[in-house]
Image (cartoon, grey):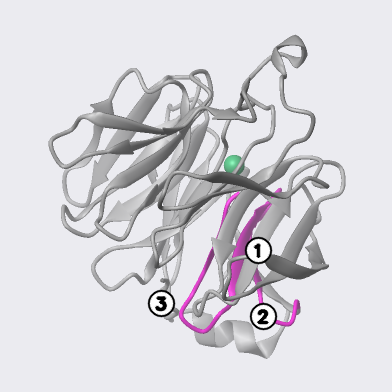
């Protein structure tokens, strides 16, 4: 069990007897944005500097799915199964339609260009939430006064929902969507959480965890509400109350993770030059 660090007995219920971290692909540059596509039975993920989105199909391996991508970073699916993507160099959030055409969803806020949208999640009513730190642009290219957390409503209205993050980054909802988790990947190393009200305003922000080593980036939850946050040494698994249950140790530093396969029991992990996976007893959402 050297792939895992068990800090609480509850972590054992997450693992299968044969759970192990497997390397699926290497020789990449900086991998991010994993998302499982159930309708196709494959994983998509970004290689940001390579300007590519790759497809990993179990049993077949790796292929280039899109190039160029605007240096795509985070990806997710909306409720119709369409890919929603954060693009660094084109500084926008896009949606890929079933016929492959790209619809631009957001480029500006209050007349100024977005920084470099980083990661994205879609609520069950179709509302899109994304973070906008400046990792993908030069300091002199920054137009926004803050690194916002944004809410993009189904009618196209873009609303800044938090302005006090240093580097807002990965984000995900609790299974019932009453809580929103957002990473601050600055020197703060914070995973913050807030309550999501029925009117989609946010309240009661608090720090759930301070990630060490490294800073949090992408994160996901499982059906039991446990949070899987990337960290410097792997993926840290937290109970909803913030108790660190254990760690999935990864040879390279992960930037993001996503549950996949038909049963959603495999956690795919994008970590620098590689793609890893670990099959668990836990089931992701
Ligand atoms: Mg990120």
Residue 75 point in image, percent of width and height: 42, 44
Per the image, label 3 sits on a secondary structure element best described as: loop
Query: Residue placed at 64% from the left, 37% from the top?
Result: 132
Residue at the far left in the pictured view: 99
Q: Is residue 5 left or right of residue 156?
A: right
**Is any part of residue 192 visible from this angle?**
yes
Residue 273 magenta-highlighted: no
Answer few, some or many: residues within 10 Å of disc 1's Cα (few below 14, many 20 plus, some between 14 and 19): many
| SS at circle 1 | strand
Which numbered disc flags the more N-terminal residue, 2 or 3?
A: 2
For disc 3, the marked residue is 283
Quarter of the picture containing the N terminus is bottom right
Name the side, left or right, on which 223 lies relative to 147: left
Circle number at residue 239: 2
Which residue does the image show at 57% across and 76% down from the upper left? 198
Q: Is mark 2 within 8 Å of ligand 1?
A: no
x then y, percent, for residue 65:
24, 31
Q: Is mark 1 within 8 Å of ligand 1?
A: no
Q: Is residue 231 magenta?
A: yes
Neighbourhood count class around disc 3 (C-alpha, 10 Å): few under 14, some 14–19, many 20 upward: some
Mark sitting on residue 181: 1
Q: Is 43 left, or right, of 39 in this rendering?
A: right
Q: Vertically, is 11 above or below 68? A: below
Q: Secondary structure at mark 2?
A: loop
Residue segment shown in magenta: 218-242
Q: Quadrant of residue 235?
A: bottom right
Q: CA distance from mark 3 to mark 1?
A: 18 Å
Among the two numbered marks 3 and 1 on one chain, the one whose residue lies closer to the N terminus: 1
């Amino acid at each position: 069990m050297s792939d895992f660090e068990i800090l609480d007995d509850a972590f054992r219920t997450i693992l299968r007897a044969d759970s192990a971290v497997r390397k699926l692909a290497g020789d990449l540059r900086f991998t991010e944005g994993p998302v499982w596509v159930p309708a196709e039975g494959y994983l998509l993920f970004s290689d940001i500097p390579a300007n590519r989105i790759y497809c990993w199909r179990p049993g077949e391996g790796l292929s280039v799915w899109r190039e160029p991508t605007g240096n795509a970073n985070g990806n997710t699916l909306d409720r119709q199964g369409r890919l929603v993507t954060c693009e660094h160099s084109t500084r926008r959030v896009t949606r890929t339609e079933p016929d492959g055409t790209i619809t631009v969803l957001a480029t500006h806020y209050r007349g100024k260009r977005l920084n470099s949208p980083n990661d994205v999640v879609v609520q069950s009513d179709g509302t899109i939430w994304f973070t906008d730190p400046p990792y993908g642009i030069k300091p002199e290219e920054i137009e926004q006064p803050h690194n916002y957390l944004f809410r993009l409503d189904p009618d196209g209205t873009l609303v800044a929902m938090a302005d006090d993050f240093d580097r807002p980054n990965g984000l995900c909802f609790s299974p019932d969507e009453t809580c929103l988790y957002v990473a601050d990947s600055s020197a703060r190393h914070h995973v913050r959480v807030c309550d999501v009200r029925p009117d989609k305003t946010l309240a009661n922000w608090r720090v759930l965890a301070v990630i060490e080593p490294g800073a949090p980036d992408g994160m996901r939850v499982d059906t039991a509400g446990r949070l899987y946050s990337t960290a410097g040494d792997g993926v840290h698994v937290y109970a909803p109350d913030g108790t660190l249950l254990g760690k999935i140790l990864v040879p390279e530093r992960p930037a993001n993770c996503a549950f996949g396969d038909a049963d959603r029991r495999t956690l795919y992990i994008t970590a620098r030059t590689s793609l890893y996976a670990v099959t668990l007893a836990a089931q992701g959402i």
